């Protein structure tokens, strides 16, 4: 219910502006959208199959971008719920298993809410439900369920070809979630004692997936890691901080995984967990902190193992013990993420502790749209620069890291110079001419610049200027 209401409200924080900007470009040019953030003709990994589909929907129907994002959020949520239901059914036939699994995925994280796309905590999903990562994770659960069925039933070549295409689509839609999906797929193949005839089919699936990745026209998937370089590492260092506070409630699930391993040395959840630990641990040791985005490969199998322990075979008192442990962990996790209620009810109505955990969404920039038109270049920085492209404008420097933009550093430097307190007017005019700047948005520090005219004032003290 809470996530359904979050779909309606669509609170703005983090990367929502990036995805809205992607839809803006596809809505106006489906085949050649260009850079989603700045006025440049470069590829972007955000042009995934899912976003291209949504962009086509926006173009055909004329729906406003944020309306399409709400539809995407609803579709992603449905795909996630049904995917979890299907996958858990391959692990347990108990009717309560899927519901317990969903609760575990949402609440068994830590006592400190952690917000990041691709992470299934309730508080995180309330803000990222419209992101491609939510859709991709839902698709991944369906992929695992279908893969398990294909292995058990010795499916034919057509099914395996379809699995290869699905695997590639997952990787194209959200690369980090694609790593998690791949880890679970490897674990599933290793765990299931399949006949020798399955291995050629698996090879064909991998080959088909590789071809789909290679022919995708909107960006070069295989060049992505090289383009990103070390730029991803500093921002992902946070994933390794406060481990106990952010992921501590997963520990009972690790104990449940040990119990599963004692029963079956080739248990798929155990293999999934060990692969996740290997990837995340290697990231920590090597300093490739972006590998920490594979943390769901550690957390998800432990969450599912604890939920399944409650309904698993064995003595009644053992199941009762697991139920007590799960119930206590769910209560603690629900309390820790109670701030998510603030996204669907007024903050004043929240209890004090929940209000303290609430993270206020960003204020939108609808107030600039009577003047700023699609394709206009706006000089802005910080959070404002991350929002402007969502309404159709471009910024000089991208509000998000852009690994395929060759002059990104130069644009960032020009923006810093422009907003410098002692920058001469002639330098600002030169930057405006070089990048075709028509508008400027800032906190009011440029009111005295004779080359700018105040057009409108918005919330949080922000001012829209027209370049004279």
Image: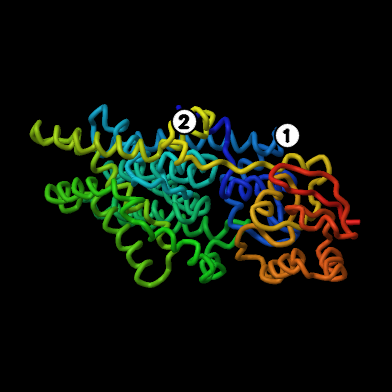
Residue at figure coordinates x 70%, y 62% from the top left: 397
Quarter of the image with the N terminus in it: top left
Q: How is the image coloured?
A: rainbow
Residue visible at 74% across and 54% down?
442
**In the rendered image, the vertical position of residue 335 relative to residue 229, given as above or below:** above
Q: Please name whichever residue, 52 or 393, is drawn nearer the observer in this view of the structure.
A: 393
Secondary structure state at the residue bearing disc 2: loop
Q: What residue is at 41 percent from the left and 37 percent from the top? A: 353
Q: Is residue 421 visible?
A: yes
Q: Residue at x 86, y 52 (%)?
A: 466
Can you identify the residue that label 2 sits on? 350
Query: In the image, which is nearer the foreground, mark 1 or mark 2?
Result: 2
Task: Answer with the quarter of the image where residue 431 lies.
Answer: bottom right
User: Tag 1: Cα neighbours inside 10 Å, few (<14), some, or many (≥20)?
Assistant: few
Of 16 and 416, which appears nearest the observer? Answer: 416
| Residue 327 left/right relative to 386 | left
Spot occupied by residue 454 in the image (x, y as percentages of width and height): 85, 49
SS for tag 1? loop
Residue 41 at x, y percent in the picture: 73, 61
Residue that label 1 marks:
62
Residue 192 appears in the picture as rendered: no
Measured along the vertical axis of the image, is residue 130 above or below residue 198? above
Q: Is residue 87 left or right of residue 193?
A: right
Crowding near pointer 2: few (<14 within 10 Å), some, many (20+)?
some
216 vs 256, nearest the viewer: 256
Q: Position of residue 196 (x, y in %)?
A: 25, 55
Pointer 1 or 2: first along the chain: 1
Mark pair 1, 2: CA separation: 38 Å
The C terminus, quarter of image: bottom right
On the image, the x and y values in percent for residue 398 come to 67, 60
């Amino acid at each position: 219910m809470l996530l359904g209401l979050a779909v309606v409200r669509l609170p703005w924080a983090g990367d929502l502006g990036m995805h809205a900007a992607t839809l803006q470009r596809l809505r106006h040019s489906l085949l050649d959208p260009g850079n989603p953030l700045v006025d440049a003709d470069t590829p972007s990994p955000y042009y995934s199959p899912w976003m291209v589909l949504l962009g086509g929907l926006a173009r055909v129907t004329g729906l406003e971008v944020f309306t399409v994002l709400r539809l995407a959020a609803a579709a992603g949520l449905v795909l996630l719920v049904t995917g979890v239901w299907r996958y858990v059914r391959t692990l347990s036939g108990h009717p309560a298993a899927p519901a317990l699994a969903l609760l575990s995925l949402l609440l068994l994280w830590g006592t400190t809410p952690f917000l990041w796309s691709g992470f299934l905590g309730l508080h995180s999903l309330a803000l990222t439900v419209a992101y491609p990562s939510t859709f991709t994770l839902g698709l991944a659960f369906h992929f695992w369920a279908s893969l398990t069925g294909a292995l058990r039933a010795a499916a034919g070549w057509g099914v395996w070809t379809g699995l290869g295409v699905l695997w590639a689509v997952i990787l194209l839609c959200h690369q980090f979630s694609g790593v998690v999906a791949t880890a679970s797929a490897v674990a599933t193949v290793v765990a299931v004692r399949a006949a020798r005839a399955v291995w050629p089919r698996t090879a064909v699936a991998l080959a088909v997936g590789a071809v789909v990745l290679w022919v995708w026209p909107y960006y070069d998937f295989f060049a992505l890691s090289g383009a990103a370089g070390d730029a991803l590492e500093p921002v992902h260092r946070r994933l390794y901080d406060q481990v106990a506070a952010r992921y501590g409630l997963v520990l009972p699930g690790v104990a449940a995984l040990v119990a599963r391993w004692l029963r079956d040395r080739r248990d798929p959840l155990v293999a999934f967990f060990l692969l996740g630990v290997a990837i995340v641990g290697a990231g920590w040791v090597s300093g490739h902190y972006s590998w920490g985005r594979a943390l769901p490969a550690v957390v998800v199998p432990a969450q599912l193992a604890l939920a399944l322990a409650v309904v698993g075979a064995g003595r009644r008192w053992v199941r009762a013990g697991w139920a007590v442990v799960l119930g206590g962990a769910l209560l603690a996790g629900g309390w820790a993420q109670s701030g998510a209620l603030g996204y669907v009810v007024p903050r004043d109505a929240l209890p004090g502790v929940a209000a303290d955990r609430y993270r206020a969404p960003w204020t939108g920039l609808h107030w600039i749209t009577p003047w700023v038109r699609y394709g206009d270049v706006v000089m802005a920085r910080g959070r404002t620069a991350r929002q402007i492209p969502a309404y159709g404008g471009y910024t000089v420097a991208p509000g998000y890291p852009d690994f395929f933009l060759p002059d990104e550093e130069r644009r960032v430097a020009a923006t810093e110079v422009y907003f410098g307190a002692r920058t001469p007017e002639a330098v600002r005019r030169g930057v405006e001419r070089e990048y075709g700047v028509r508008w400027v948005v800032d906190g009011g520090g440029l009111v005295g610049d004779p080359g700018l005219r105040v057009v409108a004032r918005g919330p949080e003290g922000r001012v829209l200027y027209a370049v004279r």
